């Protein structure tokens, strides 16, 4: 299943409220434990990160000595 940011927001809102029920547009999912809900959040995060592609890398160079 492809997840969206709205799915992640709904799961995080349920975690913040202390609920085990997540409501999407036309669906309701009830998790058995909070641990399952946390695992679902990590799965959605991982899916969103991998769908975004590789992260760009920033390399910072500095020189701490005196100039020439």
Image (cartoon, rainbow, N blue to C red):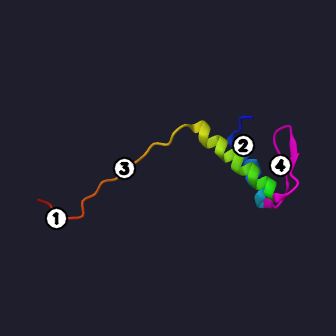
Within 10 angstroms of label 4, few (less than 14), some, or many (20 or more) residues? some
* Residue visible at 14% across and 61% down in the picture: 67
Look at mark 2 in the image and give the residue it sits on: 6
SS class of the residue under badge 1?
loop
Q: Within the magenta stretch, is there residue 22?
A: yes
As drawn, the residue found furthest toward the top would be 1
Within 10 angstroms of label 1, few (less than 14), some, or many (20 or more) residues? few
Q: Position of residue 10 (x, y in %)?
A: 76, 48
Q: Position of residue 43 (x, y in %)?
A: 71, 46
Q: Is residue 41 above or below residue 18?
A: above
SS class of the residue under badge 2?
helix
Look at mark 1 in the image and give the residue it sits on: 66
Nearest to the observer: residue 60 or residue 5: 60
Whether residue 14 appears in this view of the structure is no
Q: Which mark is residue 59?
A: 3
Q: Report the span colored magenta.
A: 17-34
Which marked residue is nearer to the observer: mark 4 or mark 1? 1
Which marked residue is nearer to the observer: mark 2 or mark 3? 3
Q: Within the magenta stretch, is there residue 15?
A: no
Contact between labelled residues 3 and 2, with CB atoms less than 8 Å apart: no
Look at mark 4 in the image and give the residue it sits on: 22
Q: Which mark is residue 11?
A: none
**CA distance separating discs 4 and 2:** 11 Å
**CA distance separating discs 4 and 1:** 59 Å
* Residue visible at 75% across and 35% down in the picture: 1
Within 10 angstroms of label 3, few (less than 14), some, or many (20 or more) residues? few
Q: Position of residue 9 (x, y in %)?
A: 72, 48
């Amino acid at each position: 299943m492809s997840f969206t940011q709205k799915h992640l927001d709904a799961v995080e809102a349920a975690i913040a409220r202390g609920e085990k029920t997540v409501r999407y547009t036309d669906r309701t999912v009830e998790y058995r434990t909070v641990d399952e809900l946390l695992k679902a959040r990590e799965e959605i995060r991982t899916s969103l990160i991998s769908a975004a592609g590789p992260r760009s890398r920033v390399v910072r160079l500095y020189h701490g000595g005196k100039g020439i």
